[in-house]
Every structure is written in structure tokens, then in C-alpha cells.
């Protein structure tokens, strides 16, 4: 299992738009082959901070996600709303397998 976390900091005036666009991306992503989880988390203390938690069965399927029309649309749509570039970290799961 491959897990990617993505930290996104959004400009205050675009928070609601970001949430809407990210929900659309989430809804399509959970239908992808090999998707195990796709969580959209909102920081309790900082309304402009979000964490995406994405789990896929393999590195190939995680990479395939980044080529889907819904991901490419999301990436292009939300980029101007960010305070800074998003930060992604990738992990290989030890448990669960």
C-alpha cells in the first residue's frame, strides 16, 4: 500500500471554493481502481489548512491517479487559491498491508 499525504494552505477568500473542488476530486478518486482511501481533512485551528490522505494498492495505481482528468482539473483549478505550493509526502505502508 502506498500512502500520500498532501498539505495544502488555502487563501482565506477561496476556502469554500477549495472545499467544493476537493470534494469533487474526492468523489471521483474513491472510484479509481486500487484506491483504498481518499480522506479530505480540515485543520481544526487553521481554517486555511487542509491535509489530503490518499492510499492506493500500489505505486503504479497511485501514479495513475495523477493522470486522471478529475485530478488534473482539480490541480489546475485550486493552484491559484493556494498560499504556497502544496507539500506532498509519500509512504510505503508497514501495517496494514
Image (cartoon, grey):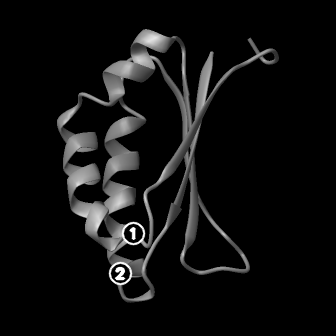
Q: Distance between the residues labelled 2 and 1?
A: 8 Å
Q: In this view, does 24 lie to the left or right of 6?
A: left
Image x and y of residue 10, in percent: 45, 73
Q: Tell me which residue sits at (45%, 66%) in the image.
A: 84
Figure check: 50 above or below 44: above
| Residue under pointer 2 | 14
Residue at screen point 63% across, 15% down: 1
Quarter where residue 41 is shown: bottom right
Extreme residue toward the right, this view: 95
Q: Residue 58 carries which label?
A: none
When the figure is inspected, residue 41 is found, relative to residue 27, above or below; the finding is below
Q: Residue at the far bottom: name it.
A: 13
Q: In which quarter of the image is residue 22?
A: bottom left
Q: Residues within 10 Å of mark 2 (few under 14, many from 20)?
A: some
Question: SS of the residue at dot 1?
Answer: loop
Q: Image height check: is 34 above or below 11?
A: above
Residue 76, picture quadrant: bottom left
Q: What element carries label 2?
A: helix
x, y percentage for residue 35?
47, 25
Q: Read off the residue under disc 1.
A: 82
Amino acid at each position: 500500500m502506498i500512502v500520500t499525504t498532501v498539505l495544502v494552505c488555502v487563501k482565506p477568500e477561496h476556502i469554500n471554493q477549495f472545499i467544493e473542488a476537493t470534494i469533487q476530486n474526492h468523489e471521483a478518486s474513491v472510484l479509481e481502481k486500487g484506491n483504498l482511501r481518499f480522506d479530505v481533512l480540515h485543520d481544526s485551528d487553521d481554517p486555511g489548512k487542509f491535509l489530503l490522505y490518499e492510499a492506493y494498492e500500489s505505486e503504479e495505481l497511485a501514479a495513475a491517479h495523477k493522470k486522471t482528468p478529475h485530478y488534473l482539473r482539480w490541480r489546475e483549478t485550486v493552484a491559484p487559491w493556494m498560499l504556497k505550493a502544496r507539500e506532498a509526502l509519500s509512504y510505503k505502508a508497514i501495517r496494514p498491508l
